[in-house]
Amino acid sequence: MLDSLSFSLPSIPPRLAPRSSPHPSALPLLITPLQSGHRRIFRRRNRTNMSSDHRRLSSPANYSELNDESDFETIVSPDGFISICGFGSLLSERSARSTFPDLIKFRVAKLTGFRRVFAHAAPIFFERGIAKPETKEISSLSVEPCEDETLIVTLFEIQKSEIPAFIERELEFRFLAVQPTTLDGKPFDNLAVLCARSSDEEFFQVRCKGSKEIYFQHYGRYNIDKIWRNDILPCRVYLRHCEEPQQCRLRQLSGSHFPCRP
């Protein structure tokens, strides 16, 4: 899929400075056009469960894709809250509250059918000066479907009014509605939002609506020509923020669920 999306950028200087980055009009972006007679190139999950009965899936391994704000609203609880699945630094309640200060019901949960991966470049690491492109230590954490895998996650609720800001902040991800369970396997009453691995093609076509200007605002100004990739390493500072709460959870549980790279 990614073969149809390519960028050509100048070499990356040792210290990236947004103001010296090329304007998006200078990026020769090549997108293979979608033709009406061809199948859509984006993977879309079965949405038959997107209904009033969408609160419970038949199996924790099942999931549905949330494509826009109206899809998010299908899993809002009767009292106006939506559940979020946290991983990485969001295993820490303090870290979660730094992003969602009004969250409620923070607790530990289990999610079946997914694994953690370091597979995408994060602009915030460049903004804060903690990315190391020379060693490819630029990756943040995401998750991807993986049969027979189980994650320890956190679960918390945010208000329905926070959904637009959440979507904008986590724009590079594919949003999934998943069924987390308690540690002893009992499903929670409501489905939760999970930020999952996406693709460059989907990000450009769907999130950026095919606009190089929008892409430039999010990634191009940091000379990031490829977002989702398999040849990058975790940002070290971010990794510490992920590892510390994970160690705390491992004191409560046996076994490891965190794929640390050497």
Image (tube, rainbow, N blue to C red):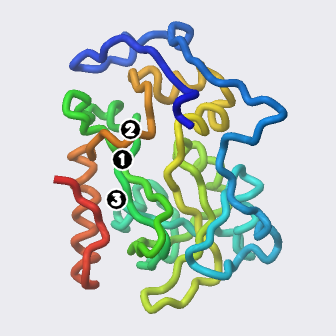
Q: In terms of depth relative to the viewer, which is nearer, 184 or 245?
A: 184
Q: Amino acid at mark 3?
A: Ser
At label 2, the amino acid type is: Ala
Q: Position of residue 204 (x, y in %)?
A: 60, 31
Judging depth in this view, the residue of 137 and 251 nearest the camera is 137
Looking at the image, the residue that sits furthest to the front is 37
Q: Residue at x 82, y 69 (%)?
A: 51
* Amino acid type at mark 1: Ser
Horizontal side of 158 relative to 144 (left or right) equals right
Residue 157 is situated, as x and y percent measured from the top left of the image, at 56, 70
Quarter holding the N terminus?
A: top right
Which residue is nearer to you in this view: 142 or 190? 142
The residue at 38%/18% (across/down) is: 18
Give how far apart the Cα atoms at labels 2 and 3 are. Answer: 16 Å
Q: How many labels were placed on the picture? A: 3
Real-space Cα separation, disc 3 to disc 1, in angstroms: 10 Å
Residue located at (27% from left, 46% from top): 234
Q: Which residue is mark 3?
A: 89
Mark seen at residue 238: none
Q: Are marks 2 and 1 in contact (CB under 8 Å)?
A: yes
The residue singled out by tag 1 in the image is 140
Q: For numbered disc 3, what is the local secondary structure? A: helix
Residue 219 relative to residue 117: left or right: right
Residue occupied by mark 2: 121
Closest to the camera, between mark 2 and mark 3, is 2
- Residue 224 image offset from top left, x and y in percent: 41, 26
Indicate the secondary structure of the residue bearing disc 1.
strand
Q: Residues within 10 Å of mark 2 (few under 14, many from 20)?
A: many
In the image, residue 92 above or below residue 253: above
Q: Residues within 10 Å of mark 1 (few under 14, many from 20)?
A: many
